[in-house]
């Protein structure tokens, strides 16, 4: 039987996960887990913007694990890996920095945008934040992943990872790393409940996967819609309307959604009715997650065992990679023998 290809994907532990994470990533991960060996990474090295609240990061590691279990990521099929518990990630980041020119980091559009956001709220940007794309490259290459699930906006980062891996292999003369490929799926990007293009817990514009039914009801009923749709009889705008974007993402009754859109656009359909149907659709999605989450919240030992087993698998993969990297770079001094012994 052929060895399964490996996937690496992950998330920073900065809080509980929300519907944007599910639509944009987690749904695809669940679909992939049976066909690939998956390394699901909790990237806690990459939280330098939360250095003043490490306790929040610690809580978030636990929350992310609970959310993963709730959505159906089976730790028997994939590995839940905490980045800091596989310290070889730090070593590989340093060694790969030899093969990454500074220019691509400076030009990274996502990094530039996030640094600008950070500079508005802090006096300075830590170096750790600047180099987190390098750490992400090490994350992908550590388990020697073949595929990385991404949206099309992340394709340049996969190309950069391939460039670093190819340069390492070429300059050392050893094919240590496979060249990872992007695995493009149907990625749904959601705006915030307030219509903001970016979902953020700090803005309070998300529906979290752990939200109960009353919280979902309250949040949906407060959602931004078409500001010109003042009366039920008025024609309404569907494009750019968050309520209909969420229907497209989470309401499986495609025909009903199409009918609602047509009715809303011609007038005669109120926002309240559209929102009530959205509440039902979201609750139908979240109810099984709530049940699974409650199961694991009542059994914290199972959560810890999933994390410990995943980190053990992550360390095993990392040991093999780091051994090969050191040999390729001739850093295995005592196995190879010191220069005097080579004469």
Image (cartoon, grey):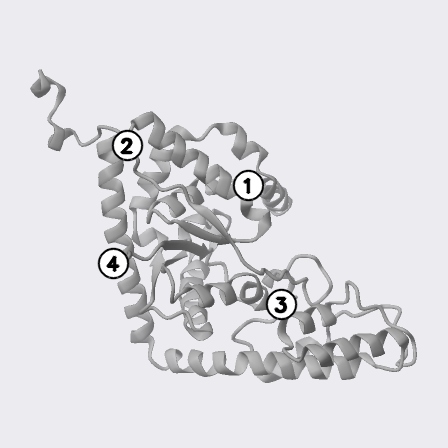
Q: Position of residue 302 (x, y in %)?
A: 30, 75
Compute the Cα span from label 2 to label 1. Answer: 25 Å
Lower position in the chain sequence, tag 2 or tag 4: 2
Residue ID for mark 1: 156
Q: Position of residue 185 (x, y in %)?
A: 54, 58
Q: Position of residue 259 (x, y in %)?
A: 78, 79
Compute the Cα span from label 2 to label 3. Answer: 46 Å
Kindly check if marks 1 and 4 are in contact, taking CB atoms under 8 A apart as contact. Answer: no
Residue ID for mark 3: 206
Kindly check if marks 2 and 4 are in contact, taking CB atoms under 8 A apart as contact. Answer: no
SS of the residue under disc 2: loop
Kindly check if marks 1 and 3 are in contact, taking CB atoms under 8 A apart as contact. Answer: no
Lower position in the chain sequence, tag 1 or tag 3: 1
**Residue lying at 37% horizontally and 78% vertically, measured from the top left:** 296
Lower position in the chain sequence, tag 2 or tag 1: 1
Disc 2 crowd, CA 10 A, few/some/many (<14, 14-19, 20+): some
Of circles 1 and 4, which is in front? 1
Residue ID for mark 4: 312
**Residue lying at 52% horizontally and 61% vertically, measured from the top left:** 25
Compute the Cα span from label 1 to label 4. Answer: 31 Å
Kindly check if marks 2 and 3 are in contact, taking CB atoms under 8 A apart as contact. Answer: no
**Where's the C terminus, which quadrant?**
top left
**Residue lying at 53% horizontally and 32% vertically, measured from the top left:** 104
């Amino acid at each position: 039987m052929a060895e399964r290809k490996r996937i690496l994907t992950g998330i920073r532990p900065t809080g509980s996960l929300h519907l944007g994470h599910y639509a944009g990533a987690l749904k695809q991960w669940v679909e992939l887990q049976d066909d690939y060996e998956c390394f699901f990474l909790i990237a806690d090295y990459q939280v330098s913007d939360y250095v003043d609240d490490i306790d929040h990061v610690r809580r978030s590691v636990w929350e992310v694990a609970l959310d993963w279990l709730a959505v159906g990521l089976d730790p028997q099929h994939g590995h839940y890996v905490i980045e800091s518990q596989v310290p070889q990630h730090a070593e590989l980041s340093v060694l790969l920095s030899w093969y990454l020119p500074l220019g691509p980091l400076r030009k990274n559009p996502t990094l530039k945008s996030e640094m600008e956001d950070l500079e508005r709220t802090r006096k300075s940007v830590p170096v750790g934040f600047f180099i987190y794309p390098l750490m992400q490259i090490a994350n992908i290459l550590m388990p020697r992943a073949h595929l990385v699930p991404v949206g099309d906006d992340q394709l340049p980062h996969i190309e950069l990872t391939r460039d670093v891996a190819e340069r390492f292999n070429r300059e050392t003369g050893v094919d240590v790393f496979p060249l990872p490929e992007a695995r493009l799926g149907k990625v749904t990007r959601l705006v915030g409940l307030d219509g903001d293009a970016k979902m953020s817990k700090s803005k309070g514009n998300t529906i979290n996967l752990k939200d109960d039914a009353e919280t979902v009801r309250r949040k949906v009923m407060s959602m931004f819609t078409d500001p010109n749709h003042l009366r039920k009889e008025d024609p309404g705008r569907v494009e750019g309307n968050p309520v209909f974007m969420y229907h497209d993402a989470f309401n499986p009754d495609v025909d009903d959604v199409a009918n609602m859109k047509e009715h809303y656009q011609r007038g005669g359909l109120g926002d309240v009715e559209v929102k009530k149907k959205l509440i039902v659709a979201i609750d139908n999605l979240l109810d099984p997650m709530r049940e699974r989450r409650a199961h694991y919240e009542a059994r914290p030992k199972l959560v810890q065992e999933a994390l410990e087993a995943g980190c053990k698998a992550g360390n095993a993969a990392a040991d093999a990679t780091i051994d090969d990297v050191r040999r390729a770079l001739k850093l295995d001094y005592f196995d190879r023998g010191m220069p005097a012994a080579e004469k």
